[in-house]
Amino acid sequence: MMKRSRIFCFLPVILSLRALSGVAQDSVLQFVFTSDVHYGITRTHFRGADSVASTVVNRAMIAAINRLPGDPLPQDGGVGSGEKIGHLDGILITGDIANREETGIQPAAASWRQFEADYDRLLKTTDRQHQPTPILLGPGNHDVSNAIGFWRPVQPARDASSMAGIYNRMLRPAHPLTAATYDYATDKIHFIRDIGGVDLLFVNCWPDSVEQAWMSTSLMGVQPGKPVLLFTHSMPDVEARFFTNPNGDHAIDSTDKFENLLPEIYRDGRTLKDSAVIEQRGLAGFLLHHPEIKAYFHGHNNYTQYYVWHGPDNNISLPTFRVDSPMKGSISSKDEKQLSFELITIDMRKRTMTVRECRWNTAPGDPSELQWGQMKTVGL
């Protein structure tokens, strides 16, 4: 970890610098972004043990997040370079809280209880106002499949516990929903949170035409020039299987294997082998009409990747950030030293954002050590 040493000779200079630092700190927002925590499964190997439960791995990641405020940012030229992290204004998780309940996997109800016990009990960080760091959640494809069923056998056939739990925490209904009363067709998990002058926009699984209609209405009230960051589960190049089955009675079945995660009926073809260009073109068109959306964050097929999404017609340039998973990372599931989450640091005065990869398990024998990987700075 980097350490800084500064020696000042005059008390007035110290006071002046502290005052300036306070102003700067007030204008800096910081968020941890992760996804696909997948309670209910095991990692093949973690810190010298085999078949390690998701609770153990997530608790280790939470411990790493708790260490962040006491550490400095790397000297990399990005926002806050070299400064102490100090506070976290949100923990952002884009779904797959519970793993799908296929053979040998516990019910979503058990996974949701474990998630709440770990993240609510063990997370100790605070935000700029010295209040507990809020946790913002969106649903993933596994959460949705547990609620509506899947084309392979699952047990129980339906368990909406994680969907109801996310809905209650994020939408705060007067009468909280239960796994029995949650209805995926009507109980939509999408919301906007203003934190420090930035709107965090969470939508269901992938921003299909139904979500775009909701976003268009919701974004009408956004002050001109205010940046919006979009968080969802899947990458912009969405898979065909996410859409509603275009065949027959549109059911979830083992013949067509569409998962009906999105209410939009698939239009590109009739099979999963077809592309989703029509749907991606619709998303690109929506984003072109909403330049206030400055970046897109997602999980799903998990590894660290900072890229620009150009759409199927190469007519858009949207900064996009893909994040690793503590349980199912494409790379980190095989090499635990690559386990990472992302730290988003925003300077609201300069309207600049830096996203940094924080590798939290590079020395499994010394879990106190955090290392920094990729980084990217974009204007807002």
Image (cartoon, rainbow, N blue to C red):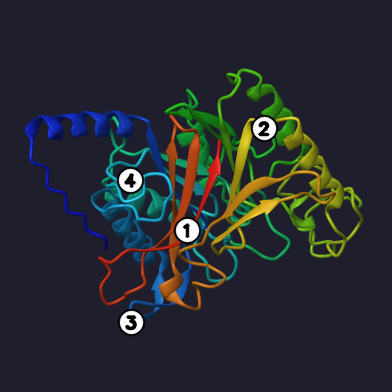
Q: Position of residue 200 (x, y in %)?
A: 53, 35
Instruction: Please report whichever mark, 4 or 2, sits nearer to the chain's N-terminal start.
Output: 4
Identify residue for label 2.
186
Mark 2: few/some/many CA within 10 Å (<14, 14-19, 20+): few
Report how far apart the C-alphas of labels 3 and 4 lie in the structure.
27 Å
Q: Which mark is residue 48?
A: 3
For the C terminus, the quadrant is top right
- From where the camera sits, is residue 189 visible? yes
Callout 4 crowding tier (Cα within 10 Å): few <14, some 14–19, many ≥20: few
**What residue sits right under mark 4 in the picture?**
120
Question: SS class of the residue under badge 2?
Answer: loop
Q: Amino acid at mark 1?
A: Val
In the rendered view, tell whether residue 186 sits above or below residue 241.
Answer: above
Q: Marks 2 and 4: in contact by CB < 8 Å? A: no
* Residue 235 left/right relative to 114: right
Q: Circle 3 sits in a helix, a strand or a loop, which is it?
A: loop
Q: Which residue is mark 1?
A: 37
